[in-house]
Image: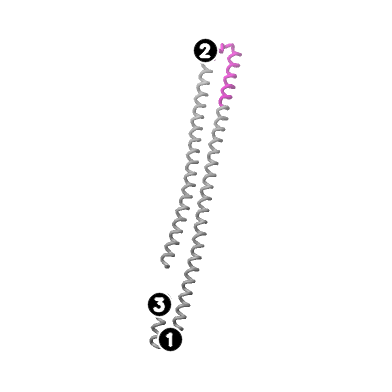
Amino acid sequence: MELAVAALGKVFAGVGLSSAAGTAAGTAATAAGTAAAGSGALTALQGVATTLKVLGGISAGIAARNQANDAAAETELQAGHEQLQSAQRTTSMKRELARVLGQNDVIYSAAGIDLSGGIAQQTASEQSKRATDEISIEQQDSEFRRALYRVRARGQRAAGKSAMRGALIGAIGDVAQFGMDVGNRG
């Protein structure tokens, strides 16, 4: 640009319009300098804006990842709580079985029935088998619920990692766009 202004100045001087050429050259040089300063300021402002956008995007990705990790930790705590509740339910079933068997023993003893055989033994065996089946079902259900909690926690952690990757890719895209804009401006 400055070379073009200097060339115009020489052409005008050769034609005898040196004062007009000097004024035109000075005005053109001032305009070129202002444009260059404006372009530099625009680039600097765009660079600051891009930096803030990148930092904001990465911060949002970190926050999303942390939130997902917190949710996963809470889900894992729920799995532990489920295991505790299952143990309590199992213990309650065993206590109920012992209470029922004890009541039956008292009833059969009061009736003079031998507890070591016959109907008393058969009833106790059936009740023990039924309680064992219920306890087994409870333990299997509890294990299934805990497995669901573990799967949910893994999914939450994966979502957090994905949010972070998305933020980083977005930041790379913003920086690339800034570079292309500066390159296009020249």
Q: Residue at position x 48%, y 68% from top? A: 40
In this picture, is 169 found above or below 17? above
**Residue 96's spot in the image, x, y percent?**
58, 24
Tell me the distance, in whole angstroms, between the alpha carbons under discs 1 and 3. Answer: 16 Å
Q: Which residues are magenta?
A: 93-121
Residue 172 in percent (x, y) is at 45, 56
Q: Marks 1 and 2: which is nearer the front?
A: 1
Q: Main secondary structure of the magenta part?
A: helix
Q: Amino acid at mark 1?
A: Ser
What numbered label is drawn on residue 18?
1
- Which numbered disc, 3 or 2, marks the residue closer to the eye? 3
Quadrant in which the N terminus appears: bottom left
Circle 3: element type: helix
Q: Which residue is mark 3?
A: 4
Tag 2 residue:
118
Q: Earlier in the sequence, mark 1 or mark 3?
A: 3
Measure the alpha-carbon separation of dots 1 and 2: 133 Å
Mark 2 crowdedness (10 Å alpha carbons): few <14, some 14-19, many ≥20: few
Q: Residue at x 49, y 57 (%)?
A: 54
Q: Amino acid at mark 3?
A: Ala
Asked if labels 3 and 1 touch by Cβ distance under 8 angstroms, the answer is: no
Q: Earlier in the sequence, mark 1 or mark 2?
A: 1
